[in-house]
């Protein structure tokens, strides 16, 4: 493994494990960065495939349904959804339009601002979310959380807190 080799090398020749600003990433930095990207992509692909197969919705659609279902008034503006996801406002609008066609959400004018739109779950949407949530959480535990001890999860949670959001 690249990172183990770097640690071993450090004990001997003591190569730099961390680069300076503007320099290429060191093997250790590259292994950490690419590892995070690779694992994230693989886990997301498997979770997405499972939701599509079991519930007929993508991971992104699930995320939108979950955010709306968990919102204080069980309603969210399209712009709020965009801020809470990796989708642009137009991307959220297209996703919401698909979910409207599937009968999972409604899109209604905002009461306090007629220019904006709010998204709310339908009865069918609440049922789909409930079923998909159970599958998704089981998948998150199987694909990611279950691979670590409680102590390792504490360390991971602390590590993520260092990165601004």
Image (cartoon, rainbow, N blue to C red):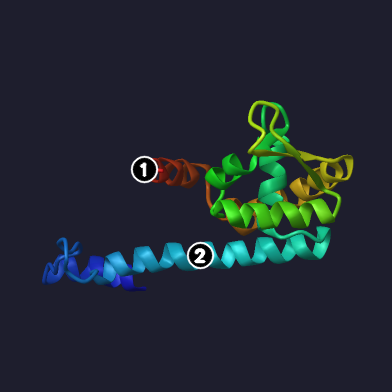
Q: Would you place residue 59 above or below residue 84 in this image? A: below
Q: Would you place residue 57 above or below residue 74 in this image? A: below
Q: 10 Å neighbourhood of mark 1: few (<14), some, or many (≥20)?
A: few
Q: Is residue 139 visible?
A: no
* Side of 98 where 41 appears, left or right: left
Secondary structure of the residue carrying numbered label 2: helix
Dot label at residue 84: none
Q: Give the residue displayed 19% in from the left and 62% down from the top.
A: 18
Q: Give the residue displayed 70% in from the left and 43% down from the top.
A: 66
- From the viewer's side, name the closer residue of 65 and 133: 65
Which mark's residue is nearer the viewer, 2 or 1? 1
Q: How many marks?
A: 2
Among the two numbered marks 2 and 1 on one chain, the one whose residue lies closer to the N terminus: 2
Secondary structure of the residue carrying numbered label 1: loop
* Side of 28 where 101 appears, left or right: right
Q: 10 Å neighbourhood of mark 2: few (<14), some, or many (≥20)?
A: few
The x, y position of residue 14, in whole percent, is 12, 67
Residue 25 quadrant: bottom left
| Image quarter (top left, top right, bottom left or bottom right) of the N terminus | bottom left
Q: Which residue is mark 2?
A: 39
Q: Give the residue displayed 48% in from the left and 68% down from the top.
A: 38
The x, y position of residue 85, in whole percent, is 56, 49
The x, y position of residue 24, in whole percent, is 21, 71
Q: Would you place residue 77 above or below residue 92 in this image? A: above
| Image quarter (top left, top right, bottom left or bottom right) of the C terminus | top left
Q: Give the residue displayed 71% in from the left and 66% down from the top.
A: 49
User: Which residue in the rendered view is the most extreme toward the left?
Assistant: 13
Q: Is residue 12 visible?
A: yes
Q: Which residue is mark 1?
A: 164
Q: CA distance from mark 2 to mark 1?
A: 20 Å
- From the viewer's side, name the closer residue of 64 and 94: 94
């Amino acid at each position: 493994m690249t990172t183990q080799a770097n640690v071993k090398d450090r004990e001997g020749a003591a190569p730099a494990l961390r680069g300076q600003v503007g320099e290429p990433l060191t093997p250790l930095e590259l292994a950490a960065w690419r590892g995070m990207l690779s694992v994230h992509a693989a886990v997301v692909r498997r979770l997405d495939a499972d939701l599509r197969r079991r519930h007929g919705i993508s991971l992104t659609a699930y995320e939108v349904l979950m955010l709306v279902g968990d919102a204080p008034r069980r309603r969210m503006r399209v712009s709020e959804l965009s801020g809470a996801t990796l989708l642009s406002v137009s991307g959220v609008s297209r996703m919401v339009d698909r979910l409207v066609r599937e009968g999972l959400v409604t899109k209604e004018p905002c009461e306090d601002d007629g220019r904006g739109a709010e998204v709310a779950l339908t009865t069918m949407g609440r049922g789909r979310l409930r079923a998909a949530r159970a599958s998704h959480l089981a998948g998150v535990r199987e694909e990611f959380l279950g691979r670590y001890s409680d102590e390792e999860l504490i360390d991971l949670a602390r590590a993520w807190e260092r990165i601004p959001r």
